[in-house]
Amino acid sequence: MKQKTSLPAVFLTPAMMILAVLAFVPTVYAIYISLQNRELSRPVGDFVGLANYIDLFSDRRFINAIGVSLTWEAVTVGMTLIVAVGLGILLFECAAPRMRNMLALLFLMPVILPRVSAAFVWKFAFHPLYGIATYPYKAITGQPLDLLSNPATALATVALVDVWQWGLFFAVIVLKLLETLPPQPFEAARLDHARTWEIYTHIAIPMLKAPLISLAFVKMIESLRAFDLIYVMTRGGPGITTETLDMYAFSQGFIESGRISYASSMAVLMMIATSIAFTFIWKRVQ
Amino acid sequence: MRKARKLVSSIAFACLLSSTASTVALAAECTETIKVLAQPRDGLTLLEDYKAEFEKLSGGASFEIDYLNENDRRAKTKADASTIGKYNVYYIDEANVALFASAGWVAPLLDYYPADYDYADFDPGRQKVATYDGKVWFAPITGGGDLMVYRKDLLEAAGIAPPKTLDEYIAAVKKLNQPDLGIYGTALRGQRGSGANVWRWMPFFKGFGGNWFDGKTPVFDGEQAIKATETYLELFKYSAPGSQTGGWDEAVGAFTSGQVAMLIESTPLVGMAIDPKSSKVAGKVGYLPPPAPLTGGGYGHGLAIGAKANKDEASKACAGLFVAWATSKENESRRLEANQFSELNRTSIMTSKKFAELYGPDLGQALADTGKVTAVNFWQNPQWPDLGDRWGIILEELITGTRTDIKDGLDELDGFAKELVARSQ
């Protein structure tokens, strides 16, 4: 029979208390001020009930930001996983172990780079007049290519930088995961004349399902925090085509209006929506 | 000769400093480090070389400057001043001085600005934008109006005389636009923001006779705003790539790299355009006041005393001393010596022999002429950043084509302005 011990409680309590202070206090405070009409220049506000929440649903920028955030989430998570799995398999299949290690080191570089630095580097690279990434197009057609000013391409261009950072990093993880898999199932499949794509589709990827799902979750959470990348590269423009929810909330709270209560109501809604979405997805996956 | 001049100026500095120091030393004994939140400026970087001088002057206090780019500086100063108030001195500007003053985030400057430092010497236009509700709130570190800056070589080659009217300007821009040769007619600001695209749009709006408000009633939603927007969008067809979502940096970068024929920009552009270190077109640049009927966008950025971090009168006096020293004649003379044109704000410096020697009589004349058409184009109200930024977004949508109906955009802004007024009451 197991002996009852208070040791777990002793170790857990301080950590839980710190977590409670760091997580619950700001959350409760955000909910509290979201029910008021406080502004930075007018710190004392009145209670307005759910007015801020109701106003949000007639705010075209908020509705637009929901769409942009969902698109951003789907594109960056999806593309990162596709790039990671594709490159990981390519390295595993085509590169010798030494070359793999060298490439793995190279692939880790982008994610080590601070987001803001990466954003600036790519912003200059995409500049229509002096950018190195747009130069080939200009050289061939004689016309400048302004990807970040074009509403049709701006979000995809910023997403490309995100995938460059995280897709390559995840490719290294996928490669290392593939290296840990037992070789027998692969050998058996080859004896049965399975094609390479069939081996990966039917054997390797199903075997890696659990870690790939974990990677997807990590990326989903990370993609929610892409504020710095988008802010530096487009500031939410052209117009509002790359304005995500966190960027709009920040803008309302600190850049344009100083409407911290209104911004808090957005933050609270985002928190509720992400908690529900992640719980739902987690349960479905399990 | 050069050494002798340096020696003379050093003696002059020493005399001025000792005279001001003796007066100020009586007023303040400062020992705490003065924290400053600013945006990058060559003049402030230069100031950091003279920390020891300020320490001596203040009785032991040093200073630390944190830099953020313009938009981030605006957001951070607002957040800091309204919450923890960590900074003793804020870099503020014409667009948010009303907000900072009315919210009580900054202290009235002249109450703590030692008289010896001669505030009245600042350019009158800059004094005007630093004033709100009858009180002065910041000491200018940069400012001015607009100039039309053009490539003399390109205009001569095309047989075009420097435009004096807006119609001539538009015709010249169209004629000079040769994308195949890598030359664009102009460079505008498309990036959202009251200090970005709206700043460059306002001279058209005010030049066509537009007004923001009549008392508390918005009156901007009329013919003048439509015409201003149509003209701005028309000119954007000839604006350098990258400027559609770019601001000052992109417009100026395109001009100084030799890809733009002419543009109307804030006066510091001239200093950069004629300096061979920062411009590929130095020696080919001409400048004149903006073509009629455009008004120049009068602006001023400067240092203000934070109200929260400086809890008592003594701390405010120390911050005031720092602001006065940082914007003093002595430090402006140093900036002039270092060829920092955009950092000059004092009449005594801009009318000095040294200024004329460095920049020639033409620039002095152009600055004097543009002063006559320089105006306060924005709505001088604490809610201006809010309104200006909202119009900035709508304008960026119009520029990049995600919206096409100008009237609809102005109607949306009108509704927003009414809400804004209602909220403030």
Image (cartoon, rainbow, N blue to C red):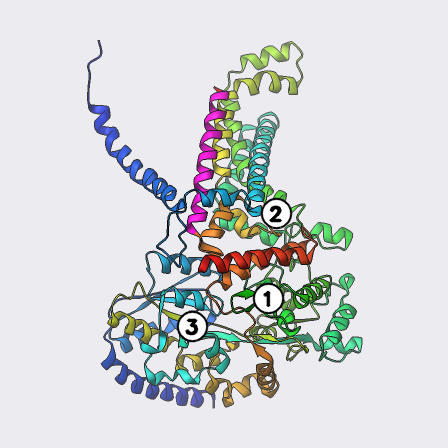
The quadrant of the image that shows the N terminus of chain A is top left
- Which of discs 2 and 1 lies nearer the camera? The answer is 1
Q: In terms of depth relative to the viewer, which is nearer, B171 or A61?
A: A61
* Residue A128 appears in the figure: no
Pair 3/1: label in front: 1
Q: Give the foreground label among 2 and 3.
A: 2
Which residue is at the front of the view, B57 or B385? B385
Is residue A270 found inside the magenta-colored segment of the image? Answer: yes
- The residue that label 2 is drawn on is A241
SS at badge 2: loop
Residue at 57% x, 63% y: name it.
Answer: B196
Q: Which amino acid does label 1 sit on?
A: Val
Residue B234 in view (yes/no)? yes
Q: How far apart are marks 2 and 1 (CA)?
A: 29 Å
Tell me, yes or no, whether dots 2 and 3 are on the same chain: no
Q: Give the range drawn in magenta.
A: A260-285
The spot of residue B326 in percent (x, y) is 38, 75
Q: Are marks 2 and 1 in contact (CB under 8 Å)?
A: no
Which secondary structure lies at badge 3? helix
The amino acid on which the numbered mark 3 sits, given as a three-letter code, is Leu
Q: Is residue B326 above or below residue B178?
A: below
Provide the residue designation for mark 1.
B219
In the picture provided, is A123 more to the left or to the right than A144?
left
> Residue B98: horizontal and vertical position, in percent?
44, 68
Q: Say above or below: A12 vs B283.
A: above
Closest to the observer: B205 or A46?
Answer: A46
Q: Residue B46 carries which label?
A: 3
| Image x and y of residue B14, in percent | 33, 86
Local crowd size for mark 2, using a 10 Å CA cut-off: few (<14), some (14–19), many (≥20): many
Crowding near pointer 3: few (<14 within 10 Å), some, many (20+)? some
